[in-house]
């Protein structure tokens, strides 16, 4: 049975929350010198990539535009909200 797009987006959200949790309050050097932490971050980036690859094409395009806007420092212009009923970093799953 195929998973629906919402479940893939939930995977992305959970992995983003974990990455935030793993990096919060740390310097770049602290993150990059902690092998276990870095492995956790890289694993969650892989989860995000796999989930995005499985999204329908129209959603994937929207997702990529959002990342481009964030990278360009325009995140405030996006209408991005967490999935209903989910907290961001407090309960990454």
Image (spheres, grey):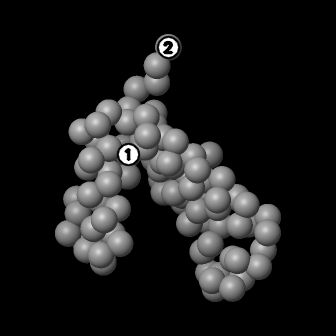
- In the rendered image, which quarter is residue 54 located in? top left
Q: Is residue 19 left or right of residue 59?
A: right
Q: Report the front residue among 90 and 24.
A: 24
Q: Position of residue 34 (x, y in %)?
A: 78, 74
Q: Is residue 91 visible?
A: no
Q: Give residue 24's quadrant in the image.
A: bottom right
Q: Residues within 10 Å of mark 1 (few under 14, many from 20)?
A: few
In the figure, 48 relative to 42: above or below?
A: above
**Vertical placement of residue 20 versus 30, above or below:** above
Asked if 38 appears above or below 54 in the picture, the reply is below
* Residue 65: % across, % down: 26, 57
- Rounded to the nearest angstrom, the CA distance separating label 1 from label 2 is 23 Å
Kindly report which numbered mark, 1 or 2, lies closer to the viewer in this rendering: 2
Residue bearing mark 1: 83
Q: Is residue 29 left or right of residue 18?
A: right
Q: At x 33% / y 69%, what residue is drawn?
A: 70
Q: Position of residue 42 (x, y in %)?
A: 64, 59
Q: Nearer the viewer, residue 92 or 75?
A: 75
Q: Residue furthest top?
A: 1
Image vertical order of residue 67 relative to residue 25, above or below: above
Does the rendering let one see residue 63? Answer: yes
Q: Position of residue 68 (x, y in %)?
A: 31, 65
Give the total number of marks visible in the rendering.
2
- In this rendered view, identify the residue nearer to me: 70 or 10: 70
- SS at mark 1? loop
Mark 2, Cα crowd under 10 Å, few <14 / some 14-19 / many 20+, is few
Q: Give whichever of 20, 35 is nearer the camera.
A: 35
Q: Secondary structure at mark 2?
A: loop
Q: Which residue is at a point 74% across and 66% down the rendered structure image?
A: 37
- Which residue is label 2 attached to? 1
């Amino acid at each position: 049975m195929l998973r629906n797009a919402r479940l893939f987006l939930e995977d992305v959200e959970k992995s983003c929350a974990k990455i935030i949790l793993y990096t919060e309050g740390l310097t770049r050097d602290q993150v990059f010198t902690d092998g276990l932490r870095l492995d956790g971050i890289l694993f969650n980036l892989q989860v995000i990539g796999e989930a995005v690859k499985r999204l329908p094409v129209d959603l994937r395009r929207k997702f990529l535009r959002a990342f481009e806007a964030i990278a360009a420092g325009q995140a405030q212009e996006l209408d991005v909200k967490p999935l209903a009923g989910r907290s961001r970093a407090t309960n990454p799953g």
